[in-house]
Amino acid sequence: MKATQKKHDGLSYEYEVQIPAKELDQKVDAKLQSYSGQIRMPGFRPGKVPMKMLKQKHGKAVLGEVIEEAVQEATQKLLEDNKIRPAMQPKIEIDKDFAEGKDLIYSIAIESLPDFKIMEFKGVKLEKPVADVEDAAIDDALERIAANRRSSTPITEKRGAKEGDIVNIDFHGRLASDPPPEGDHDHRRPGMHAHGHMLELGSNTFIPGYEEQLIGAKVGDRVEVKITFPEDYHATDLAGEEAIFDVDVHEIREPSETKIDEEFAKSLGMEDIKALRKAVRDQLQKEYDGQSRLKMKKALLDILDENHEFEVPEGMVKMELEQIKRQITMEKQQAGEETELSKEEEEELQEIAVRRVKLGLVIADIGRNNNINVTDPELQQAVIREAQKYPGQEKHVFDFYAKNRNALESLRAPLFEEKVVDYILELADVSEKKVSVEDLSMDEDEQEDKPKKKAKKSSSAKKSDEKKSEKKSEDEPKAEKKEAKKPAAKKKGKSRV
């Protein structure tokens, strides 16, 4: 083998590698010899077929295997001889003029991992913001739990339904273009009928205009509801179509407030209200501790970023950037926003990609140098935690990770990162600082603006609030979480209405 360097620019290398025809021929002979006992030809016993005849019959087929193995061996030797640690899979291109009996020439392009020195962690100062759970926060959490478990009672007076009432209805729907229904139970449109459905008027659960037409309806009434499905409706066969629903009103109920008392606590599986408040306090404290760690980890990553300067592989940055763009595009599509990125956004995402790759290399090096690994039991626990997120589908989750090695490895990366962070925190000088819950949940930009913009929230604050509202069940004790998620089943998409 002969390797000639054609280019070296920073972390990028290009070589031309030449493997003599004689060497390939010898490898082909050795390969054929190893197969000779399995090859049968008329007039010869297994293992006694002359090499010349073996080559004529099977030489070309074996040459393909030999070339693949020879390129792998030559490339590995090239990397070892030149002390190159490839950042990604090298790009190999075999000379198109190669033919049997000629030297094998191929080009190889490699990006190397950078060499850098890891900073010292002893003496690194980090501040850990901590917040205490206040009684008011527990009260707020309990009120949210109670709101999720709000009960209702049938109305006693004879009146029509009003906004805020809960009506028990049957409905059968059809498109305006469909033939008239054949009887009361014509289910020709799957997803457009239901029996005993509990609908809160004014909740905007159903298609716009639907609930308003039930205002004033009385028990025993049949109401013909006419609506038009939105143009962007998730069921494309219904999008933009006019529809008619025959709605039978069976019962009208008024929501009643849930008292937060001993009975309420027991309904959640708690011994008494004191135990319930403790469970909520513990859950909130767990959330605060998680936010505290995130803030401290962010500060640590900033320190790692500032104290390590080296060139990062362009290929890794490009791959990371594409992954970020896919995620951003998906989020924008779901929000119904324009997906094309501005020049400013492109530049910002480029910086994020560079930082991620850089920190990934630093964290990997720290882990490698200090023998930090994710054990199989730790990985199994991660799979179990993922499965617990999908009650009733645990087996499917286990099977998915058992059959998808890449998916399993995607769970290993964050575990490894957290173990490296723990290792650094043990060496660093960490001090605690008492902060308010508001400051703990604020990002850095908001904290800088706080004295100037007390009354005005930034867009990032609004997004943070939206995420909190989506995760409000996190305030609940574990015994309550399953029950609190029930209202989500009423969201548009669960029914075609």
Image: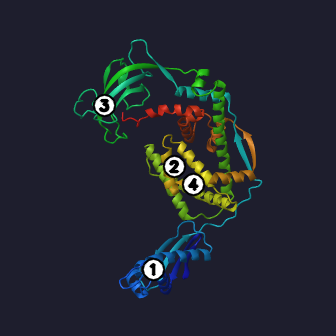
Which residue is rendered at x = 58% and y = 37% of the image?
457
The reply to whether callout 4 and callout 1 are in contact (CB within 8 Å) is no
Q: How far apart are the alpha carbons under marks 2 and 1?
A: 44 Å
Instruction: Please state which of residues 313 and 428 is positioned toward the viewer in this rendering.
Output: 428
Q: How far apart are the alpha carbons under marks 1 and 3?
A: 73 Å
Location of mark 1 (residue)? 37
Return the x and y of residue 72 as percentages of the image width and height: 52, 74
Q: How far apart are the alpha carbons under marks 3 and 4?
A: 50 Å
Return the x and y of residue 461 as percentages of the image width and height: 57, 39
Which residue is rendered at x = 69% and y = 58% of the image?
307
Q: Earlier along the polypeptide chain: callout 1 or callout 3?
A: 1
Q: How far apart are the alpha carbons under marks 4 and 1?
A: 58 Å
Tell me the element at label 4: helix
Q: Earlier along the polypeptide chain: callout 3 or callout 2?
A: 3
Instruction: Please state which of residues 490 and 188 is positioned toward the viewer in this rendering.
Output: 188
> In this picture, is 265 found above or below 331?
above
Q: Amino acid at mark 4?
A: Ile
> In this picture, is 258 found above or below 12?
above
Q: Which mark is residue 398?
A: 2
Location of mark 4 (residue)? 352
Which residue is rendered at x = 76% and y = 55% of the image?
122
Location of mark 3 (residue)? 173
Q: How far apart are the alpha carbons under marks 3 and 2?
A: 40 Å
Q: Earlier along the polypeptide chain: callout 2 or callout 1?
A: 1
